[in-house]
Amino acid sequence: MKLAIYGDSYGANSDEGTWPRLLHNSLGVSQFDNYCLDGSSTEYSYLRFLETYNSYDMIIFIWTSPNRSSVVTDDNGIFKHHAIIHPTFDIKDIINFHNEYLKKYPKYFSPMESRLLNHIKHESIMAKSVYNNRHSIYFKAMRDSVKYHFPNVINLEAFGNASIYRITHADAYLQGITGYLFEEDTSVRKNHLTYKQNSEVANYLFQHIKDKKIDIAETFKDPLKYYTMSKNIKESGFLKRG
């Protein structure tokens, strides 16, 4: 059996002890490929899916926020992801982010790609008024397309009421950390989860796949019941701000 995972940072790390690696070991698959990318959008994951899905018998697709978008270019058939746009970001922050990105990696981009990034500031301003409606339609279409091409796809939500994010949020809240974005010690937290939480996700997902006794989405809805929360800030791997 050949397994592929698509999505964002909630599945991007496949090191030992992470849920993608543990699941791969438990299933005993002959081939495992992880196409997840930190900070990427559904468009990016969908493009990678279309490019590769025919090679696999099992696919896990992590659906990130529909409000994310990417600068994705095709370099001789190889998709390259450069950055994200999000309608909740301040326009000034978006412009500064992309200006710094171009300064940091000037040799990485072709002239066409550089022009694309330079135009993001204008697209971002327009996005405030049209982004949400446009992307909700795109998002639904991509989900339907993935299901059409691969009917047995295993869908996981990155954000929302039944999402992996709820584990991270619950763990942070118990440590007195609030907000949407969390600073993390990546030696402690992989895929925004502790090693223990990674193990638990892998275990529930294995049961979800093998005997259908557990619906993985139901465990995300009640993280305090199904997942081990950190006892203190050091164990959690969260970095206090300030």
Image (cartoon, rainbow, N blue to C red):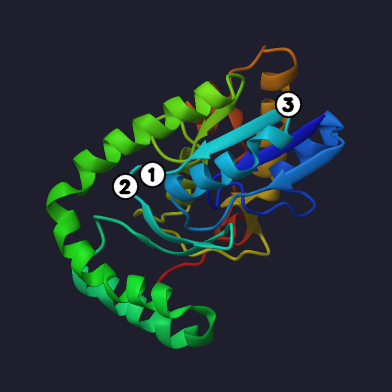
Labelled disc at residue 44: none
**Visible in this render: residue 21?**
yes
Extreme residue toward the left, this view? 129
Q: Position of residue 69 (x, y in %)?
A: 36, 53
Q: Nearer the viewer, residue 74 or 222?
A: 74
Helix, strand or loop under label 1: loop
Residue drawn at x 30%, y 56% is: 86
Q: Quadrant of the N terminus?
A: top right
Horizontal side, residue 44 vs residue 20: left or right: left
Q: Position of residue 94 (x, y in %)?
A: 28, 70
Q: Mark 2–mark 1 contact, CB under 8 Å?
A: yes
Labelled disc at residue 65: 1
Query: In the image, which is nearer the foreground, mark 3 or mark 2?
Result: 2
Instruction: Indicate whether 69 appears above or below 183.
Output: above
**Residue type, numbered disc 1:** Ser
User: Which residue is labeled 2 in the image?
Assistant: 67
